[in-house]
Image (tube, rainbow, N blue to C red):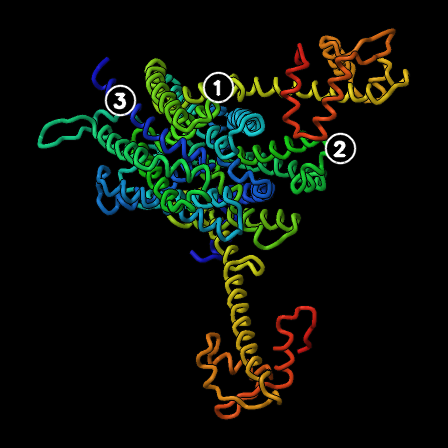
Amino acid sequence: MTSAQIEIQLIASLVAVACAIPGVFLTLRKMALISDAISHAILPGIVVGFFITHDLSSPLLIIMAAFTGVLTVFLVEFIQKTGLVKEDTAIGLVFPALFSIGVILIAQNANDVHLDIDAVLLGELAFAPFDRLELFGVDVGPKSLWVIGTILLITISLLVAFFKELKVSTFDVGLASALGFSPAIIHYGLMTVASVTTVGAFDAVGAILVVALTIAPAATAYLLTKDLKKMILISIGFGVFSAISGYWLAHGLDASIAGSIASVLGFIFLIVFLFAPGTGMVSVSYKQSRQKIEVLLLTFLLHLKNHTEKKERHVNHLGEHINWQKSQAKSVLDLALKNNMIVIDKGIVALTEKGDTFTENAINYITDHSEEAIEEMKKDFFLFRG
Amino acid sequence: MTILEYIELLFNDYTLRTITMGTAILGAVCGMLGSFAVLRKQSLLGDAISHAALPGIAIAFLITGAKESNTLLLGALISGLIGAFWIKAIVTKTHLKSDTALGLILSLFFGVGMLLLTFIQKQANANQAGLDKYLFGQAATLLEKDVWFMASITGACLIVLLLFWKEFKLLLFDADYTKTLGFNVKFLDGLITSFIVAAIILGLQTVGVVLMSAMLLAPAAAARQWTNSLAIMVGLAATFGALSGVVGTGISASHPNLSTGPVIVLVASVFVLVSFIFSPSRGLLFKEIRFRQNRNDLKLHKTLSFMYDIAKTHDDIDHPHSVRILNNFHGYTKKSLHKLEEENLIVVIGTNWSLTKKGFQKAENLYNQHIEIND
C-alpha cells in the first residue's frame, strides 16, 4: 500500500465514523431525510461563500454551508408549523428550491467560478491526498484528513458530554423538557453537527453519498440491536468496514470510491434486512405465516368445541363452512394432529382431552387477557409450531 | 424581447416549441400524480425513486451498449420500481420508519449507480458521453418523439385515473375501508405507485435526478391550499405544473446561462409560496387577518362586559359613567370605544359613556352561547 492509499482509507473511515454518529440519532428521531435535505441545500451556501472569498478551501465556506444547513432545518420546521403541508412535503419543497438557487448562481457566474456541481454532488476521494495542508512550511498530511478529523473530534466530545441529554430527548421529548434540558437546543445542536459533518464530508465523498454514510449504517444497526450504545458502536463498525472494503472494491473495478462504499453499505443492509434474526424479512415473514396458521388452528378448535353434531365436524366440511382453501385446511389439520389436539375417526374430527383443555384455556385467555399471553400458552401446549 | 415576440417565437421555433410542450406535459402529469403522492404522505418518494433510477440507466447502457433513450428509460423504470417496492417492504416488514427507508434506497441505489457510471466511463466506449445528463437533466435535448412519448404516457395515466377514480379516492382517504369493501388494495396501490414511478422517470431527462422531487410535489402542495376537493386539486396541480413548465422554459430561454430544470423548480416554488400566503381559506395572510379580527372582537367583548359589570350596579342602565374609569382596564382603547359606539352598543356624551339597551342585552348574554343575539 502506498501512503496515498492509506491516507484515502483513513479519510474514508473518519468520514464514515463522523457520519454514523449523528446518523444514529437522526434515524431514531425519524429525521433521516433531513440529512438528504441538508446535503443538497448547502450548495447555495458554498457558492455564496466562494463568491466572498474566491477560495474553495476557505473555512468561511464551511461556516456558510453549515449556516445554510441549519437554515434548511429552520425553514422546514417553519413550513411544517404552519400546518399547510406535512413534514415530508416541507422537506421536499425546501431543498430543491435552495439547490436550484445554487445551480443557477453557479451557472450565472460560470466564467469566474471554478466550482463544478458534479464535484459538489459526487465528490472524488481519490484526489483528497493531493490537497495537502502545510503548517509552517511542513507537510502535515491531506487537508481533508484534518478537516474531517477536527469535525469528528468535536462530534465525539459533544456525544460524550451530552450523551444522556441526547438519549432522553430522543426517546422522550416530554421527559427531557420536564427534566429541564431544552429539546430545542439539543435539536438544533444535533442539526448543526449534522450540517457541519455533511459539509466536512462532501468534498471527500460528495453530497449524496454523505446521506448513504449517515443513514445506512444506523439503519442496519437498528435492525440488529435496540440498545443505543450498541447501535452507535455497530454503525461505526459497519461504516468503517464499508469505507475500507469499498475502497478496495473501487480499486479493483477502477471506479468511483464513494459509489463503491455506498454499494458495500447497500449490500450489507440487504443481507441484514433479509436475514437479521427476529427483525429481518425472512424471520418476520416466517413468524407472520406461522402466526396465521396458528390463529386458523385456534379458530378451528373453537369451532370443534362449539359443535357437537357430527355434520359440523366432518373433514370435508372445513372447506365449505369456514371457507378455507384445501392446502390451508390440510396444514391446519396436520398441525392439530401433530400436537395431539384432535383425533380423526372416519372423517369426523373430535377434540382430544389435551385439545379440549387448550381450547378452554385459550378462550379464557382471549376474554381475560391481552392477546400476547397466548404466545406463552402456546409454548406449554405445542410440540410443533405452525 | 417582449412577451408577444416570445409567443411568436414559440410558434415558429421548433426547439423552443418542443421544449415548452415537453415541460408543460411533464408538469401536468407530475402535478396530477403528485397530488396522490402528497396526500398519501409519499412526498419524498419522488426524490428516492429518481435517485434509484440511476443504476437502471447504467445497467441498461451496459447491456445494450447504446444510448437509445427508450431502453435507458426502461432500465430506469425497472430499477425505480424495484426501489419503490423495496421501500414498501422495509416499511411493512421491519420497524424502520419510512423516512429511513426512503433515505436508504435513495442513497444506496444512487451509490451503486455512481459506481456503474464511473465504471462505464473507464471503458473504452465513445458512446457513453452524455449519460450524466440524467443527473442534472437537459431539457434542450428533448426531441419531438420524446414529447409524443410523454404525451402518450400522460394519456394512459389519465385514462387509468378516470377508470379507477373512485377506487383511488377511497384508497387515498381510507385504505382499511377500501379493503373491507373487497377492492384489491395491493393492486390499486401497485398501480398508483407504478404511475408515480413512470412520471418520475419521464422527468429525469428534463429536470434531472435532484430536482425531480420538487416537480412532483410543488404543484400538488400549491394546489392543496386552494381546495378541499380531490378532483379540483388534481386539476389545479396539473395546471400549476404545466404553467411552471411553460413559464420556466420561457425564462430560461430568454436569459443566457440559465438551465431549464432549476428555473422550472423555482417557478413552481413561487407558486407554492404564493399559495401558502394568499390562499383564502388556508393561506397565512388571511389566517393572520382572521386571527387579528378575532382578537379585536374579543377585546371589544371584554370592554363591553366590563362596562356591563359597572352598569349593572345602577338602577337605570343608561346611567352615564366617566370614560376615565375605563383607563385602568386592560382591553380599553379609544378605538374600541368608537367601535362600540358605531355598533350602537354604547352612547358617548362628552367624557361620559352609557350602555344602550342593545349593549346591555348583548353584554348580558355574552357568555351565554345558547341565546342568539339579533344585531
Q: Is residue A112 visible?
A: no
Name the foreground residue: A70 vs B22. A70
> Which chain is home to disc 2?
B
**Mark 2 vs mark 1, CA separation in Å:** 35 Å
Residue A194: x and y, percent? 35, 37
Q: Name the residue under label 3.
A: A10
For the N terminus of chain B, the quadrant is: bottom left
Q: Can residue A354 be seen in this view?
A: yes
Amino acid carrying label 3: it is: Leu
Q: Which residue is drawn at 55% across and 41% down?
A: B26
Residue B87: x and y, percent? 54, 29
Name the foreground residue: B353 vs B76. B353
User: In this rendering, would A353 be left or right of A384?
Assistant: right
Q: Which of label 3 and label 1 is nearer to you?
A: 1
User: In this rendering, would A319 be left or right of A287?
Assistant: right
Q: Which residue is drawn at 38% across and 21% down?
A: A238
Name the foreground residue: B374 vs A179. A179
Q: Mark 2 points at which residue?
A: B182
Amino acid carrying label 2: it is: Gly
Name the foreground residue: A176 vs B132. A176
Q: Mark 1 points at which residue?
A: A272
User: In this rendering, would A119 be left or right of A90?
Assistant: left
For the C terminus of chain B, the quadrant is: bottom right
Q: Residue at x 62, y 82 (%)?
A: B360
> Which chain is home to disc 1?
A
